[in-house]
Amino acid sequence: MTRPERVVRAIRRTAVLASAAALAAALGAPHAAAQEDDDDPIAGVREVVVKLDPAAGATIEEINSTYGTSTLDTLLGSAGIHLLAVPEGSAVDDIAEAMDEDPRLVYAEPNFTQSAPEGASRFASAWNDSDPSAVRAERYGSQYAVTQLGLPAAHAVTRGAGVVVAVLDTGVQLDHPLLAGRTLGGGYDVVDDDPDPSEAANGVDDDADGKVDEGTGHGTHVAGAALLVAPDARILPMRVLDSEGNGSVFTTAEAVNLAVASGADVINMSFGSTARSELLEEVEGDADESGAVLVAAAGNLASTERQYPAAAEDTVAVTATDVNGVRAPFANSGPWIDVAAPGDDIVSALPVGAYAEWDGTSMAAPLVAGEAALVLAVRPRSPEEVTALVRRTAVRIDSGSGAGRIDVAAAVRAAAETGGEDGEGD
């Protein structure tokens, strides 16, 4: 695909990106309210994702001719996976259902929306401008999660050097004092289809929820949280969510493929949807086979309803705990959860050059991603071995939080003791 073609399809995809519901907290709240969009993940969607069955021998042109669809994009590195625009006046779920019964296709599904589950960055508790930057940075390094996770003891063994953590999110402020020199080239903006994965506020209320750029800062905060646990790891930023915090399964799938191709050892996804996607499950399975550990936020609805990609088989689903080490009231729970990590009042970076507290499972997930990076830095392991070790060393807290709250110090000790053969225990 030529550069002009990629730009055109990026504009077309942006124009049809589905709107997600408001993610904002009440004005004046001390920090971001932990809440999540619970709207229909196909509301406003005008795209379907299809995979051709190679045994059937059909072309995408033949599929388009049958259904009146048109090709917007083809998944990079895929085997016949295409993003199609549905014709005006047609219901995307009806077309996807009809296509899913077509023997020429392996599967077909709407291009489900995905959203960052936390409130707007401007409602996060950014420190007063009178606070010197040194004080803000000190708050980052001395927050309760440092002690609760045993990070000093873990860092005496390893700080994650040589491990790459891909952060799929709203982008990253690359020159933030906390992140400067700690990100890798090779990141990408899959939303706008360009090689600059920086946070990109546009000053427009794209999702018509009365708030402008409410997702901006989410990715920067998440990247800083991963570095809290693995300070010598390198962040590979992939922008998959727009400035409102919204994206789609197709952009996520593209970013997962790009992250693996760029050498990511760990992939963090602090966003989700109630919709289960065959496309994402396929891509995540391929990433797992390639050796990447996938970690995702479990959501903030205080619900047991499964959130994806967290609930996918090849992904570590992370819920959140509070300062007391118990599951936070907003955090999702259930048998599909793998582990929990601190996600209440987490201090990290925020554009431009600031620090802030933020709540949510989005903040908990990168702490687990950082833990996985430390385990891999001790000795290379398969994703299954990393997950088993993280679960086995966790501290039990309740029946809805999987194996329990992570213990990074214990995981690093176990990694050094067990070598590469970790069992499948909890």
Image (tube, rainbow, N blue to C red):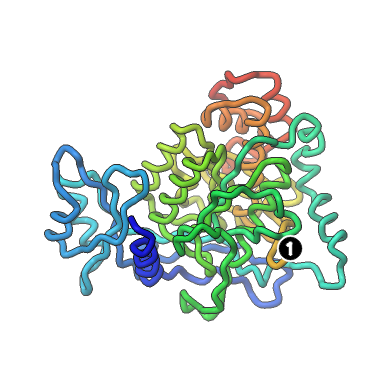
Q: Nearer the viewer, residue 128 or 97?
A: 128
Q: Residue 140: where, in percent of width, then height?
A: 79, 54
> Residue 366 or 327: which is nearer the viewer?
366
Q: Quadrant of residue 99?
A: bottom left
> In the rendering, at what x and y percent does residue 380 appear?
60, 26
Q: Position of 393 compared to 171: left or right?
A: right
> Does 123 sit above or below residue 367?
below
Q: How many numbered circles does the render carry?
A: 1
Q: Is residue 402 left or right of residue 290?
A: right
x and y percentages locating residue 186 in the rendered image: 54, 49
On the image, the x and y values in percent for residue 148 come to: 77, 42
Side of 59 relative to 23 (left or right): left
Name the residue at 81% across, 50% down.
Answer: 141
Q: Is residue 104 above or below residue 213?
A: above
- Residue that protrudes farthest toward the bottom in the picture: 210
Q: Give the secondary structure at mark 1.
A: strand
The quadrant of the picture occupied by the C terminus is: top right
Work out whether 123 lies above or below 418.
below
Which residue is depicted at the point 81% across and 32% down?
A: 156
Note whether residue 306 is visible: no
Judging by the rendered image, the residue that carries numbered circle 1 is: 356
User: Badge 1, how many Cα within 10 Å: few under 14, some, many 20+?
Assistant: many
The residue nearer to you, when weighing 222 against 74, is: 74
Query: Which image quarter is the N terminus in?
Result: bottom left
Tell me what residue is drawn at x 46 percent, y 62 percent: 191
Residue type, numbered disc 1: Ala
* Residue 19 appears in the picture as rendered: yes
